Amino acid sequence: MFTSNPFAVLSESIPPSAIQAYVGVMIALVVGGTLFDVWHKGSATYFFDNWRNSRGKGTHKVGGGKILSLAIQTALVEVLTSAEFGLGRRRAAHLLTMYGFLLYVVTTVVMVFCPAAATPAVLPQLWIAGALLVCLGGYWFWFFIRVDVSAEGHTPFRIMRADLFVLSLLATTSLGLIWAALQSVESWGTYIVLVLYLIATTVLFGSVPWSKFSHMFFKPAAAFEKRVSEAAGSRSNLPAPADKPETFGSARERPRHY
């Protein structure tokens, strides 16, 4: 399990081209779903309108060098370290989940398109590590950090549409680990878990317009716009980072726009 490419083992019963085509479809679903989400919710129009308004209200002009510097700061602070969450458990859980997900996705793509004989032993190990990080951060958040669970005392099994992304992500990585572990055992249970794994993965990448998946693309753009607005002397209409991230909500209210 720790040194073998699970997708190479799968290719013994399913043509590698079919597996690669499935991954390509998932990538297309993410791209298409994000573009649809931007169009449907008017996110791009709102962003650029707000950008123009903020620059128009600014007291001074921000040059190209400064904009580049702000872009780098946004990437280092808001994207790579998730500083908007402040210090606390929520930020730690978010970072574990984010980096675990990136590691899991990248290694999945590489192992699917890499022939079995050419797969370095470290790739399956990184794939497992990524999935475990997602499970650690995701389950920690789900059972102990969510505001309606930790502060309001609701059951952790209370589910809303806003939970679609985190639940499908946890299901995908959890089932992926189980499926990889069962590959060494020739059992019909392996195929059942594989089917469930594919269903969870399809829901994860196919539900972008209805889940919070696309927020990972919107948040950096919003953070960058805020930095540029403040540098130009214009007050951004975006909220400041929470001072107490432990009690910060999980955006479980019904969305205001569709």
Image (tube, rainbow, N blue to C red):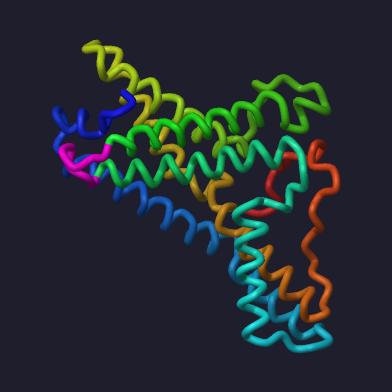
Query: Relative to the observer, which residue lies in front, 207 or 183?
Result: 183
Q: Residue at x 60, y 33 (%)?
A: 137
Q: Residue at x 50, y 35 (%)?
A: 169
Q: Residue at x 52, y 34 (%)?
A: 134
Q: Going by the image, does 15 lie left or right of 110?
A: left
Q: Going by the image, does 52 lie left or right of 29?
A: right
Count of numbered badges drawn on the protein:
0
Please tell me whether residue 65 is drawn above or below residue 134 in the rendered image. Answer: below
Q: Quadrant of residue 120?
A: top left
Position in image of residue 68 (x %, y %): 61, 77
Position in image of residue 60 (x %, y %): 80, 88
Q: Going by the image, does 252 lie left or right of 43?
A: right
Magenta stretch encompasses residue 227: no
Position in image of residue 131 (x %, y %): 46, 32
Q: Quadrant of residue 196?
A: top left
Q: Residue at x 31, y 23 (%)?
A: 1
Query: Relative to the observer, which residue lies in front, 104 or 121?
Result: 121
Magenta stretch encompasses residue 116: yes
Query: Relative to the observer, which residue lies in front, 191 or 46?
Result: 191
Please tell me whether residue 178 is drawn above or below residue 254 in the rendered image. Answer: above
Q: Which residues are magenta?
A: 113-120
Please tell me whether residue 207 is drawn above or below residue 195 in the rendered image. Answer: below
Query: Relative to the observer, which residue lies in front, 207 or 148?
Result: 148
